[in-house]
Image: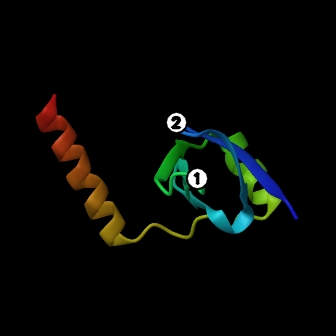
Amino acid sequence: MTTIRTTCPDCGTIELTIGQVTLEPGRYRFDCPLCDTTRLHPASARTVSILVTCGVPPVGPITEDEIGLFVMELDVQAVEL
């Protein structure tokens, strides 16, 4: 079975199965098996390539709802600046 080694800011180095990792645009997501916290890590093109090669399914097309949420998040961040 393939394992993916990554880090949790609270727990340190952890190992995950393919099914525990989700690819998203520009990042990957997982729930830490030790502290049960959802973690997001940036994913470069190289990282995405490695994860897909290991068997993590690539992200599907972005929906209009996701674009709307992204735009709203950009607006919130602009207000915070």
Residue 33, how many percent across, how many down?
60, 57
- The residue singled out by tag 2 in the image is 9
Q: Residue at x 21, y 54 (%)?
A: 72
Q: Give the total number of marks visible in the rendering.
A: 2
Q: Is residue 36 left or right of residue 19?
A: left
Of callouts 1 and 2, the N-terminal one? 2
Label 2 sits on what residue type?
Pro
Q: Is residue 34 above or below residue 67?
A: above
Residue 73, how many percent across, how many down?
24, 50
Q: Nearer the viewer, residue 11 or 57?
A: 11
Quadrant location, the N terminus: bottom right
Q: Is residue 67 above or below residue 63?
A: above
Q: Residue furthest right?
A: 1
Q: Element type at marker 2?
A: loop
Label 1 sits on what residue type?
Leu
Q: Residue furthest front?
A: 34
Residue 50, how many percent across, how many down?
77, 49
Instruction: State which mark lies toward you, 1 or 2.
Output: 1
Q: Residue furthest top?
A: 81
Q: Residue at x 26, y 63 (%)?
A: 68
Quadrant location, the C terminus: top left
Q: CA distance from mark 1 to mark 2?
A: 11 Å
Say whether residue 2 is visible: yes
How packed mark 2 is, by other alpha carbons closer than 10 Å (few <14, some 14-19, many 20 or more), is: few
Q: Is residue 26 above or below residue 33?
A: above
- The residue singled out by tag 1 in the image is 34
Say whether residue 58 is visible: no
